[in-house]
Image (cartoon, grey):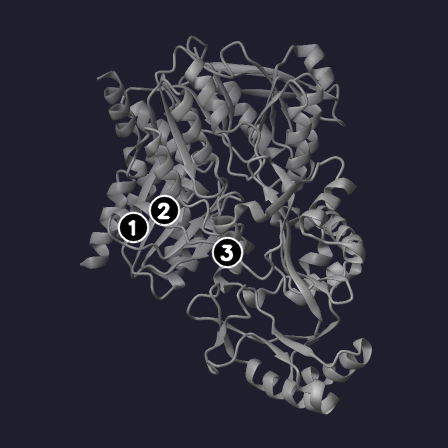
Amino acid sequence: MSVLVDKDTKVIIQGMGKTGRFHTDRAIAYGTQMVGAVHPSRAGESERFEGETDHSGVPGRPDHYSVELPIYRTVKEAVAATGATVSVVYVPPPFAADAIMEAADGGIDLVVCITEGIPVADMVRAKSYVMRRNCRLVGPNCPGVITPQECKIGIMPGYIHQSGRIGVVSRSGTLTYEAVHQLTQVGLGQTTAIGIGGDPVNGTDFIDCLRMFNDDPATEGVVLIGEIGGAAEEEAAAWITENMTKPVAGFIAGTTAPAGKRMGHAGAIISGGKGTAADKIDALEAAGVLIAPTPTDIGATMVDAIAGAGS
Amino acid sequence: MNIHEFQAKELMKSRGIPVPVGRVATSVSEAIGAVAPLIEETGTPVVVVKSQIHAGGRGKGQFKEYPELGGVNVVRNGIEGGVEAAKARVGELAARMLGSTLVTVQTGPLGKPVSRLYVESGVDIDRELYLSVLLDRSTSKNIVMASTEGGTEIEDVAEATPEKILKAQIDPGLGLLDFQARDIAFGLGLEGAAFKNGVKFIKALASFAVEFDTDLIEINPLVVTKDESVVALDCKMSFEANAMYRHPDVREMRDLSEENAAEIEASGYGLSFIKLDGTIGCMVNGAGLAMATMDIIKYAGGEPANFLDVGGGAEKDQVAAAFKIITRDPSVKGIFVNIFGGIMRCDTIAQGVIEAVAEVGLSLPLVVRLEGTNVELGKQILDESGLNILSATDMKDGAQKILEATRS
C-alpha cells in the first residue's frame, strides 16, 4: 500500500524540454508508466526513450527498455487517449500555472509540479482554480512523489528509496533525499515520499499528507521535514495533536537562519519574528513529534519514535 | 526585490494613489533647491528630509557621525522664517545626512550609508492609520490588512491588541470588492469625505498590488489630513522576484548599492548566496539542505560564514564560481562542501571543486561530503586529484571534521 501513486498509476508529462525529457527517461527506466506527453505544437509526433533499466525501481523487468511516447495537443486529448490520472509539470515558470490549470480542467486527478520560480500571483490563481475542481496539486518547486519500486514522478534519485513502512513529507528537496536515504539504511524504507515544495503557495500541504498517511494501512510512521517561514508546521502540529494515531519524527531546517533573509526557497523567510525554527520545533514537540537534533539523525529518530509508540 | 520610498511613491502616484509631493536629492544643493518649489506648490511651509535606504525604522534611527540626528527630520523653520529659513535648515541637515551612516533596528550595528535624500512636503495630520497588502500563506490569497494604530509596528499591534487588526481577503479572480473596501474604511472610523477618499485609496492599493506583483506594500502611517484627504506618508514596498520578468520598469529600480556585492555576483551565476557572520564557508545543493548544513555546523560548535545553494542542476563553472566567492571572504577559516546528488551528479561537483582550486589555490582546510548520484566516481576524482581534501561520511561527520581542522 501507499498513497497518491502506485504501480498502476498512468502518468503524462507537460513540458518536454531538456529537463522534462531527462527526468521522463529516468522515470521510465525506474518503471513508472509514462503514457504520453502534451505539447501544443508537436501533436502527432512521438518521443523515443530507450536505455538500461534502473533495477532499483519496479522489479521483474528486462534489462533494457524502449518506449515510444505519443505527444498530444491538450491534456484532455492525452487523458482521453491514455487513461492517465496523473500529470507531471516541467513547464517553464511563466507558463507553469497555466499548465497546472489545464491539467486540472483536463480530468487529471493529481498534478505534480516540479517547476521552480513560478510567480506567487500565478500560483494564487492556479491554486484557487485547482481547488474548485476534483484535482490535487503537489508542488510547485518540489522534487515530486515516489512510491518506491512502483512509481517515481519527479527529480529524486530512485536508488536511495526502498519500499517500506514510513511516509515522508517535506518542504525541501535534498533534505528529503537525506531522510529517505537514512530510512533505507536503518531498514524502515518508505511507503510514499512526497515533496510538497518550498514555495509560499503550494497545493498539497503537511496536513493533507499526514491525513493520507494516517489512513494508509501500510504506513506505520511519518517523517515530516519542515523549514523556517510561514506557519505550516505549527498547523501540522495542531492537526497531529487532534488526529494522528501514528508516530511522527521531524526535522526543521533553519535554526541558524537570520531574520528577514530569504534562504533560497521563496517561502523560507523569517518575517516579523514569525516562522522561526524554534517556534516550529516547540509546536511539534508539544504535539508529541520526536525532533531529530541534526539532519544526520532523522532515520534514528524515526526508529526511536516507532519504538516509543510501541512501548 | 526592495525599492526606495521615493520610487514606491512615484509608482503609486502613477496609479493615482495620493502621496505627498516630494523631490529626490543626492547633493546638498539639490536638497536646498527642492525647498522653494515644494513650498510654492503646496503652500505648506513645512518640509521633511528623509534618508533613502532599504531599511525600516529610519525615523527612530541614528547617524553614527551625528548621534543626535535621526534618519527623518521635519523642518518647521519655514513657518516663522519663510522659504529662506527652511532652505538654510534643509541645507544644514543634508550636509550632515548625505554621506553619513544611518543605523536603525533593521540595518544591524554597521548601519547603511545614506547617499540619497527625499525632500517632501509636510502634511497636516489629523489621524495616523496603518494599511498593507500582503500574502496570507494559510489561505494562499492576498489580503488587505488595516489598523487604526498607525505609526506602530503591526507585529506589536497583533501582539497587544489583535482585535484592532482588520483583514479582507482579495479574491484572485474578482479583486477586492467595493463592500470589502467600505468595511475596512468603516472599521478605521473614517467618515464623510475621508471615508470616500479612504475607500478609493484602499481599492487602488489592492489593484496596485495585483498589477505589480508586490510581495508587500506597507503604508505606515497612512494619514488622514485636516482637510480629509487620505495620503501615504511612508511606504515600504517589495516585489516578488519570480515575477520581475514581467515588470522591466520596476526591475530597473533595483539599487545594487543596497545589496551585498557577493550576493549579487552569486545571483549572476544562478547561485543563492547569503553572507553570514561565522567562519565556516558552506557549499551545498538544495536550499533545505543548505540551511540544515548551517544548523549542523552550529550544532557541532561552529558558526557558518554563509548560506550557499548551488541549485539542483549546477554545472562545473557554477561550482567553481561558488568556491571562489566563498574563499574570497577573509573571515572564512575552512570550507565544508555538502552535496546530496539527485539531478546534480557528484562527479560534476568534484570536477568543479578541482577546477576552482586550480584557479584560486587552496590554503584553507576543505571537507567534502558526497552522497547520491555518481558518488563513487566523485570520490575517486577527488582522491586522485592529489589535493588535501578531507572526506566525510555524513553531514555530522563533515561538520565535526571541518571544525577540528580549523581549530588545529
Q: Nearer the viewer, mark 1 or mark 3?
A: 1
Tell me the residue at 67%/57% (across/down).
B251
Q: Could you tell me which quadrant the C terminus of chain A lies in?
A: top left
Dots 2 and 3 on the same chain: no
Dots 1 and 3 on the same chain: yes
Taking the view exactly as shown, the residue that stands out farthest to the left is B408
Q: Is residue B276 above or below residue B81?
A: above
Return the residue at label 2.
A255
Return the residue at label 3.
B266
Q: Position of residue B152 (x, y in %)?
A: 55, 59
Circle 2 chain: A
Tell me the residue at 64%/31% (across/down).
A127
Amino acid type at circle 2 is Thr
Q: Is residue B249 above or below residue A299?
A: below
Q: Which mark is residue B298?
A: 1
Circle 3 chain: B
Q: Are marks 1 and 3 in contact (CB under 8 Å)?
A: no
Q: Are marks 2 and 3 in contact (CB under 8 Å)?
A: no
Q: Nearer the viewer, mark 2 or mark 1?
A: 2
Dots 2 and 1 on the same chain: no
Q: Earlier along the polypeptide chain: callout 1 or callout 3? A: 3
Q: Position of residue A207 (x, y in %)?
A: 48, 26
Circle 1 chain: B
**Mark 1 residue element:** helix
Q: From the viewer's perspective, is B298 left or right of A257?
A: left
